[in-house]
Amino acid sequence: MMRFMLLFSRQGKLRLQKWYTATAERDKKKMVRELMQVVLARKPKMCSFLEWRDLKIVYKRYASLYFCCAVEEQDNELITLEVIHRFVELLDKYFGSVCELDIIFNFEKAYFILDEFLMGGEIQDTSKKGVLKAIEQADLLQEEDESPRSVLEEMGLA
Amino acid sequence: MRELMVRAMYCEMLGYEADFVYIHAIKLAQQGTVLEKRVGISIFLKQNMYYLQDLQSTNLIEVCMALTVVSQIFPKDMIPAILPLVEEKLSHPKEIIRRKAVLALYKFYLIAPNQVQHIHGKFRKALCDKDPGVMMSSLHIYLQMIKENPASYKDLTGSFVTILRQVVGGKLPLDFNYHSVPAPWLQIQLLRILSLLGREDQSMSELMYDVLDESLRRAEMNHNITYAILYECVKAIYTIHPKAELLEKAARCIGNFVLSPKINLKYLGLKALTYVVQHDANLALQHQMTIIECLDHSDLIIKRETLELLFRITNAQNVTIIVEKMLGFLRLCNDDYTIIDLVGKVAELAEKYPFTIWFIQTMNVVFSLGGDLMQPDLPSNFLRLFADGSESEEQDRQLKLYAVDSYLAVLKGDCSHLPQRFLQVISWVLGEYSCLKEDVDQQEVIRLLKKLLEQRGVSSETRSWALSALTKLCKGPGYAELALELAESLSSSLDTVLRQQAHELCLLSQDSQLHARVLPHPAPSDNLEVDSSLSFLDGFVSDALAAGAAPYKPPHQRQEELSQQRALSLEPYGLSLPVTMSSCTLTDRQSPTFLSMSSDLSVLCVCSANTLMLEGVKRVWGKDGYIPQKEPSLTPAAVDEPSDVVQSPDQQGAAETSLPEPEPEPPQLDQEKQQLASSLFVGLGSQNSMSLLGKTEVAVPRFRRKARQHESASTSGTSESSSNSSHSSRSTTDSFLYGGLLEEEPATPIQNSYHTLNSTSENEGAATVSAKEDKQANSSQILGKSIVSQRNCSKSLPVAFPHSSDSMVLQLPSELQELPHSDVVSLTSDPHLSVSCCRVFREDALLLVLLLFNPTETALRDVAVELSCEEPLMLNTEEYGKLWLSISNDVKQNLKLLTGGGDPLRATLNALKDSLQLHIVDIIGSEGIVACHLLRGGPCLMHCRVHGASLAVWLRSPLPSLPDCLLYHCQRALQEH
């Protein structure tokens, strides 16, 4: 099971974090800080897996953003790498060639996509189409929602 | 409002406190439109109850969102409230909802497994769902459940194999493909499940050979995702019952990984190799040059993994160089976790080969590098090994002298930067052994220790170690002055331990006789007698209790009670019992249990607390070697176990006779590396490096345990058959001698086991019943660790022991006499029969030997032995209620109800009563209460309620593991019915 996922920039700014196990706020901060130091210090040619505390860290750099996942001992590292890749693909498809700014300004969307893709630390929907469809539907509903309220009720009843 | 929320959320994400907005977020989520809901919900992923109404909504997306939130971090107490709603969603027509519902249940399962117990049937339904996505999510739950209890899901192996075959064959919709590989996540999940199911189970493993082979074959493409599948396959193949052909393929795969230029694959290859090398050391040999290269890799992670691999292949010949490499890495490393881990490993290796100067040197480096991070038992293990010494006296002496020398040298230098633990070890060794060395001036040693004592930045623990070393050294009249001076300077110390020690030092130095008695030299090697139950306090405790003090409650119980008070009571008991009974005192009969338990626990607490806390205590008892008592079970294992874990005996033999043949290596490799390789891999290869042969060799140690079990089974079988044959003239009427029924309390609580024993002898019959409690056989870990679930009862032949007419001398059978055993205790006797018992401690089992002696002339025909340790506890409902409130240690579980004829509850309880000797206190409507207690032990209460087709039981007992144990036996008893 995935324990948490972090996105941070080359400069060490946290862009997105998602925790799948209950962790105290203080510990979170400490872990994020430590982990960022460790990951940022690594050179590009090095291996993308780390053993850190009792966890395995899998990270990958896309442009200026580091995607970093912590998984448990028995999990498969390579497939976690693919989880990251699939998430990037999803972001890319949704935003249309995604960049760091997209995630900064539309971070709620990024969270929605992540929630649709991973749930409770396990992969939920492996198909790219499926995830995007779910997101689109939610967006659609939201847009319609901004119109008068009776429409929503119709939608809800339909 | 919305905008503000979004900003607040951003603040929170950046790490600022924004708790105050939560309540507004909740409001927003409740009243707002969908957009506002989304914003609100995503901000407070903390817990709240307001999305309940969303779960009931008819709008698809609202339900989706609610389920997503539910699967976030979720409080345990609220699961019952929300569970029915989520459960209902399992049969929703939309697959996305079903999928999310299954995942939400998975989350619940992780948080509180017993609360979702009753819907296991629905998990099966989810597994058979027509949508592969839903099926896949249900696999998460199954993986978790199978990990906990593989035995009960063996029947699903076939289905999992079929699913995997379909997936691999590309039968799933194209949506599930990832880079044209069919559903890799699903495949990996299935492989993990299969490897768990096939572990040490040949018949299950045979089912999956084909499909594993096929997955290996199909995963050929050169992409990360196929490597992920391959890696998982390899792991599965090495986990399940081995098959030569597959092992060979897997080995080839690992080779590809290791040789790959991609660093990630190389890392995984090394990892796989580490995993595999225990089974097949030859594989490491094949890749030795790669491993050497990895050892010098610039990436620390790779280096670290390589060391891990080397650690696994260490043997007597290469240990020096491997340890050297590890220490080299330690010097570079600055990560605390890695240091702790590595230091432990180095020490483990070093301790396997003690009594050499190398050992001392290594441990010195370990102590100075590992510092105060290392596990606290390391120094004491080291000191114990050191104190125990080796067989040869002379070597021992040399070693100790060397140590003293090296430590004196260390202390003479600047020791302000040394870790405290190291200083403690140094002081102990100097105090104990510096007198071995004649040419060293004791004054010099004392001066150094004194310097240490006065040094700044030394912790008070270390000071106390140093002071006790000084106390040992200060004997004879010459030191009285020094002692006085020391005592004076420390008598005003803030640390009470130090002050006490100073005082002791002062007294001991004046009275040399007392000194010799309290601190004998050399320290006697036998362990001190310590009254671990603190029984000398019992009188005090019972006085206090009599005077009205509250009984001691162990911390965990207090914690539980506190949490019970705080938590919402969702259980039925608050209603069905009178409230006034909540504060009840214990009856006399139970207080001994409480007492003994409390004293046991307090000892536990003392032991688990910082070991050095004992320092002050030990001085009171006047013995300096408390270290030898620590973990006596650990060190013998470390000493006794011969150098080798990795190798099978054959290989070891080969290694001793010859060094491995040098591998054909490309000539351009430099000499140095080859040397390194040969020193690292020495002793690993067998001469004929035919891989198949190597594997068969390797298979031996893996299954040795199994074989031994067979062996024991067969021996017991033969003994039984011989007993049968010798008594072929067994009487046809199997009359049981009920007079000889006896009640026995074994060392651990176990089930009743009946077995009859046919033994006759002309005048006197002695039957030895050895109830073997085979701890190894106890692989099903349902019960707590201390409780043994299985028992093989083997009977051995009657042993004729010398019969002297008057005083009967009871003797153990000769083969048991060698083993350590307790005295033969007479349990009961009457004119016809006397029964004695003796406990024999064998390495793998506790044997309980019953000696039956028949002094009369009549022949003893049949003996029926009933071992029982529970007995019904007679209570009425009111007493039950009192007792129930006074104890904790809850266990809740669902049992299946017996159906057929009449009231199912009554039938089930009666069945339990018959087989387990329980007392049914009362049955009220659909609820029943049952009580029993251990012989001379604590009570256990059980509350049952019919819940649909199952029986929800709730057990409570003051003994922590008793409910689990009883529950297990209830399950067994019901299964037998």
Image (spheres, rainbow, N blue to C red):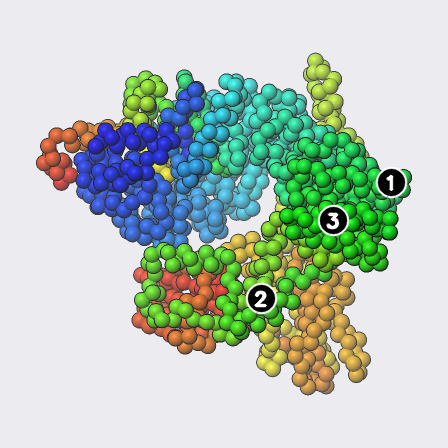
Kindly report which numbered mark, 1 or 3, lies closer to the viewer in this rendering.
3
Whether residue B719 is visible, yes or no, is no
The picture places residue B721, in percent across and down from the top left corner, at: 66, 66
Q: From the viewer's perspective, is B840 left or right of B262?
A: right
Read off the residue under disc 3: B488
Q: Is B16 left, or right, of B971 in this rendering?
A: left
Q: Nearer the viewer, mark 3 or mark 2?
A: 3
Q: What kind of element bears circle 3?
A: helix
The residues bearing labels 3 and 2 have C-alpha atoms spaced at a distance of 42 Å
Q: Which residue is mark 2?
A: B596
Which quadrant would residue B184 be assigned to in this image?
top left
**B336 versus B884 height, above or below:** above
Q: Which residue is mark 1?
A: B441
State the residue at coordinates (60%, 82%): B739
Picture quadrant where residue B102 is located = top left
Q: Secondary structure at mark 2?
A: helix
Q: Is residue A44 left or right of residue B661?
A: left
Discs 3, 2: same chain: yes
